[in-house]
Image (cartoon, rainbow, N blue to C red):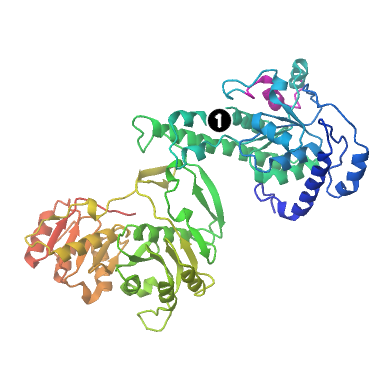
Amino acid sequence: MPLSLSAAPAAANGAARRLVYSTRRCLQRVRQDRIFLSVVRCRYSTVTRSSIRGMADVETQKAPSPALSTGHKQALISLSDKRELAFLGNELQCLGYSIVSTGGTASSLEESGVSVTKVEDITHFPEMLDGRVKTLHPSIHGGILARRDHHHHMEALNRHGIGTFDVVVVNLYPFYEKVTSSNKIAFEDGIENIDIGGPTLIRAAAKNHKDVLVVVDHEDYPAVLEFLRREQDDQEFRRKLAWKAFQHVATYDSAVSEWLWKQTENGEKLPPSFTVPLSLKSTLRYGENPHQKAAFYGDKSISVVNSGGIATAIQHHGKEMSYNNYLDADAAWNCVSEFKSPTCVIVKHTNPCGVASRQDILEAYRLAVKADPVSAFGGIVAFNTTVDEDLAKEIREFRSPTDGATRMFYEIVVAPKYTEKGLEILRGKSKTLRILEAKKSEKGMLSLRQVGGGWLAQDSDGLTPVDVKFNVMSKRVPQEAELHDAEFAWLCVKHVKSNAIVIAKNNCMLGMGSGQPNRLESLRIAFRKAGEEAKGAALASDAFFPFAWKDAVEEACEKGIGVIAEPGGSIRDGDAVECCNKYGVSLLFTNVRHFRH
């Protein structure tokens, strides 16, 4: 198994490590005026045995001289995030490393009993410009960048009295956390939180990783220390740390770039260039198919902070999410989040096959299943209300309308909240049922999609019926209930793959046709699912009808549809109007298309 840089064997060695650390702390308490132990063998198996002898043999020494030697092991530590700093400093010191540090990091190390040489004692230059200039000095970067196998490099260091660094441990100012906090940050404060010296140190050490070990993540400390104890020249390990370091800086720079772009006068959503920082959240069993490798990444862009959605959902129960699970859950959640009234949406292969809104959410659930119980079986169920005990029981016990006996099976249930009892009941439905708790997705997000050799970027489709004017084109004006049905169908069809047709009535989807190469075939599928209930219902189409007579419009009229909502825009729109007038059907043009490919 390859060595994990983030999942180090801390658990297995935890007890021993705590014993070692505790023992050293006891020894350090007897020091006075910076007297320290000169001989401590830092091996877990010998610490307890040698501790008493170490105290007896302790020799008083002066603090290490700031003058550096190219033959002495040294580590440079400069941290904003100081988690596990005391542990790291003590362990490095016990391995024979002299510690060089800056400002607050140096103070923290000294408080933990670690002997520290401050950077200014090496550079012979004080920290200045409110901390903007600390480590940007040849005495520091020369010791990092010098190649040990280049004789003239080492001669230059000796000539100028510069020592080498073997380990560089750095993380950066919390710029991302500052600019994304709930407290609005002033532009000047944002600028001051842009780290300069830190990225420079990291890049220098990562470039010279053959000779310098670079560390940017506190979770890697145990693995790094074990590597140093082994004293083996594992270049693969060094390269992985160097990769992580450059990726760390790249992610940091992308946040700065994104933030600065938003501060410009225009701040348009589509800049000339931009970077999307992704962070691995999980390795998936496979992709869309078992022969495809896959993983799930979280988006670390500033624009998506607190934006909700499936990527940040909490999984309370069930098997690990699969590639297709993420796609289907995202489709279901995006759809149900658009409705204001209590609503249930059931999705299969990213298409909503059942949608219903009712004040009684149990009734909404039953109606959503009824719209297409065959497709709903094995699908994803989403609610925009809390799943309580009663709803959980209904989900667990509800029988398929096809035979009245088969319990409905689902891959995922997703909702904004669950009661404690509701969760308990759902967990009892199936060991594999994935139960997700998600936050409503924010509108106005940038949508990205990959094509061969490039990416497409667009605004997400955030228009809902309240943003659209339904223009009456026919002689017959729809009644208020019919107009409401048309709006409901229009909101549903937006989430169906093109060519898309939805038939709906009384806040309930009756049938849908999706993904067909021609609109007429999608229409026929929708009517087949809706059956006799289609009479007097509303029909919504995601795009205009290219033909009317002896085609989709006339066929819909002949089947008794009450109102048709479509974008309009065809050169044959006049035919659609005449056809609807002939059959006494209301025709509405929205002038908005909802293609979904």
Looking at the rendered image, the quarter that the N terminus falls into is bottom right
**Residue at 79% over, 43% down:** 25
- Say whether residue 377 is left or right of residue 59: left
Q: Secondary structure at mark 1?
A: loop
Question: Is residue 546 part of the magenta span, yes or no?
Answer: no
Position in image of residue 107 (x %, y %) = 69, 32
In the image, is 175 to the left or to the right of 521?
right
Residue range highlighted in magenta: 134-151
**Residue occupying image coordinates x 59% and y 36%:** 246
For the residue pair 129 and 226, the one nearer the viewer reads as 129
User: Looking at the image, is 402 positioned above or below residue 439?
Assistant: below
Residue 193 vs residue 584, the one in the foreground: 193
Q: Percent position (x, y) of residue 46? A: 88, 48
Q: Nearer the viewer, residue 76 or 121?
A: 121
In depth, the one of 483 and 596 nearer the eye is 483
Question: Residue 342 falls in which quadrant of the image?
Answer: bottom left
Local crowd at mark 1 within 10 Å, few (<14), some, or many (≥20)? some
Q: Position of residue 245 (x, y in %)?
A: 62, 37
The total of numbered circles placed on residues is: 1
Residue that numbered label 1 is attached to: 195
- Residue 70 in percent (x, y) is at 79, 25
Mark yes or no: residue 133 visible: yes
Residue 70 shown left or right of residue 245 in the figure: right
Q: Residue at x 39, y 53 (%)?
A: 441
Quadrant of the image containing the C terminus: bottom left
Give the left or right position of residue 118, taking residue 39 as reference: left
Judge whether 454 appears above or below 340 on screen: above
Identified by mark 1, the residue type is Asp
For the question of whether residue 209 can be seen, the reply is no
Residue 241 is drawn in which quadrant? top right
